[in-house]
Image (cartoon, helix red, strand yellow):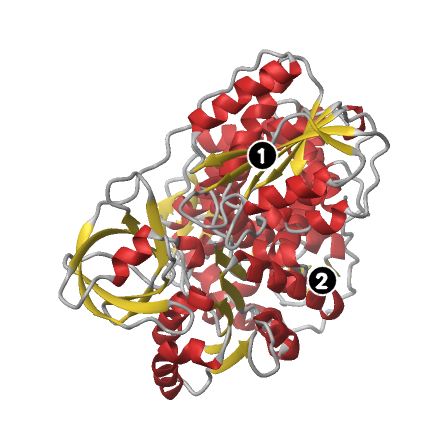
Amino acid sequence: MTISIWRYSHFILALASSLFLIIASVTGVILAIEPISHQAKGYAVQNLDKISLGTTIDALKKNYDDVFALEVETSGFVKASVLTLEMEILDIYIDPNTGLELGRIQERPFIYSFATNLHRSLFLKSIGRFFVGLISFILLLITSTGVLLLAKRQGGFKRLFSKVQKDYFELRYHVILSRWFFIPIVILAFTGVYLSVEKFELLPNATITHIEISSTDTTERFERIMDIPFFKTTTLDQIRKVDFPFSENPEEYYQIALKNKEIRINQQTGQTVSEVNYPFVALASHLSWKLHTGEGNVFWSIILLLASASILFFIYSGFAMTLKRRKKVKTISIMPDKDDCELVILVGSETGTTFDFARRLYTSLNATGKKVYLTELNNYCTFAKAKRIIILTATYGEGEPPSNARKFEAIFSTIQQPKKILYSVVGFGSLEYPDYCRFAIKVDALLQIHPDFQPFFPLYKINNADATDFENWVKQLSKQIDITLSIQQPKKIKRQGKQIPFEVLGRTGLNVDDTFLIRLKPKKKIKFTSGDLLVILIKGTPITRKYSIARIGDEILLSIKKHEFGQCSSNLYRLNKGDTIKAAVDINQHFHFPKKTTAAVLIANGTGIAPFLGMIEQNCDTTINLFWGGRSVASSAIYDDILKGTISKNQNNTIHKSHSREGNKEYVQNLVIQQKDSVLKTVQEGGVVMICGSLAMQHDVLDVLENLLAEYSATSLDELQHNSQLKMDCY
């Protein structure tokens, strides 16, 4: 709820001020260029701290008939207002050592004057200044809420600068740029508010009043300015501005603005006539001006330019993210309350394919005027007015539920529906596996034995996500519920990469679990790494099988379970050294080992160990804890030589094995509990947890991790996955 409030506040503030922020940002970019172009003129004087004020005044008096003022800009330029011997009044940049002219002060370009007026007041004078101040304050609030959202996304303020989760362009760079520029934007916003408040005289009075210091006639008089101690010892780096006396009358003084005070100096005696320190408000105003404009500092000006430009990007990316989010959850956002719906769709989907079918069914039912509620099986609860529940679910591994359905069986027994409900179950799977649609069958059985549920349509199974088969089921559903439904055609699935030949370098025999290793080498140069997938097309069918790759040198190592009726695994087992097969590499970016991590926990069972063998081989400088579960000691025999080799290369590697049918008869999740300290340490230090193997194992390990994090850590399982510290590739 809290995250929703902050996100909603962040969006509303940005929406309300977007037009003004666009104007302020565009003009801010333009105005940030001005100090940079000004500095490029090359009039900056080096070593101002070594040039005395007396030297410069003496040089000016020798070169000009009269001098009215001297000013040292924050840019390092020294400028003077002088009367030439030709009786011409000039504003010029000078060399403070010689007093000679370096260049004339030009009239400010129109674009900067225009941008300044628009930036300050929107050409609306006082009303505009008020709006600009208000927008600066809103920007401050937007930045504050943005930092809170960023901290939540990254897993806490300590992890603000941890690795950013890879996502679509707008979201990824919204996060990256906000980390880079939130401090400059806070400074821009705060100083903008301060300067606006100052303009409306809401700050304490910063006016200074000089109090004369009595002088004595016995004070020594000097003929040359260079001989007066103050002018001899005061260097130009301490000076802001000097107003010269109008005449040689002793009553006329040098009025000098230093960095922190203002003084008046007698031009003959060098005595301090009066001195007054600038109040805090005046110093704060000057600092705010420098920070807001970048005046005198090219580096800071560039930062302000980029920060102003980033605000424009934030506005674009923020709205783009909102549109994407609304589009993505459109079906959910427009749904009525769950307790007002007579028809409920529950979904179990691991890769999103089944969810896509469910979404299209929802859209079709919704178009007929029916109140429909769509959610995941994990969210199963009471439905006050539900008359029918349709369950669409995939099956993974050995009859296991998808991740978003793993809690359904436990929840189902605890929920009592207020009224009897008709139901229908649609299972998605592949006939290539012996456990075809087993989870859907299990769900259907659970509902059948429950007295409050009655099937209105028998269990329906769909092979390989066949869209035509799904449409046939929808037609039958239409007749059953007496509603005409029209299903939108799914998007075409992107084809795999181009197949290339691979040479078989070797193959082991079957171990006790009917698994074997096969080594392949691509005959053409291709990019691949551990965690990518080798895609093999089953001859004579459009069906493909994917195997997780371990990269050992330039070779591919696969660990394969040979199924009795598995066409692909059987064909691979028949291959011998020197044979050639064709396959394609599918880049599996989300399951790559992180480039920058000091520690990793790798959890696998069975053939899921394959990519980890390559990852350990490729990352010899990383502390790795490998947890592997098999049926017996003999199950790991085909991996032992490889594991011994990796440990010899990296003493920081630790291998933990469990055996479900020998010894203590433990599963891999039991090892995670036993080694919880090392697992939690890896998580807390920003390391990665990677899981590969059966989906049943994944669910059990996730349950263990969830409990450990809840008990010993402030980080949740969702945050772990969101921060890319949890990577899974299970089947």
Residue drawn at point x = 28 percent, y = 46 percent: 538
| Res. 248 image quadrant | bottom right
Residue 252 pos. (x, y %):
65, 53
Task: Give x and y (percent) for residue 259.
Answer: 62, 60
Q: Earlier in the sequence, mark 1 or mark 2?
A: 2
Q: Is residue 423 left or right of residue 626?
A: right
The disc label shown at residue 197, or none: none
In the rendered image of this protein, does residue 503 appear above or below residue 288? Answer: below
Tell me if residue 612 can be seen. yes
Position of the N terminus by quadrant = top right
Image label count: 2
Residue 243 in view here: no
| Quadrant assignment, res 634 | bottom left
Q: Judge by depth and name the residue closer to the eye, 648 or 271.
A: 648
Mark carried by residue 325:
1
- Extreme residue toward the right, this view: 418
Q: Amino acid at mark 1?
A: Arg
Q: Label 2 is placed on what type of residue?
A: Val
Along the viewing direction, whichever of 288 and 140 lies nearer the viewer:
140
Rounded to the nearest angstrom, the CA distance separating label 1 from label 2 is 69 Å
Where does the image place residue 30, in percent across and percent down from the top left?
46, 36
Name the residue beneath numbered marker 2. Answer: 273
Residue at 69 percent across and 34 percent down: it is 13
Residue drawn where x is 55% and y is 37% of the image: 427
Where is residue 569? Give x, y as percent.
Answer: 32, 57
Is residue 144 or residue 35 the one in the foreground?
144
SS of the residue under disc 1: helix
- Does residue 397 appear to the left or right of 138 in the view shown? left
Please report the residue visible at 18 percent of the width from the left and 66 percent of the height from the top. Answer: 576
Neighbour class for label 2 at 10 Å: few (<14), some, many (≥20)? many
Of residues 358 and 189, the one nearer the viewer is: 358
Residue 6: quarter of image: top right
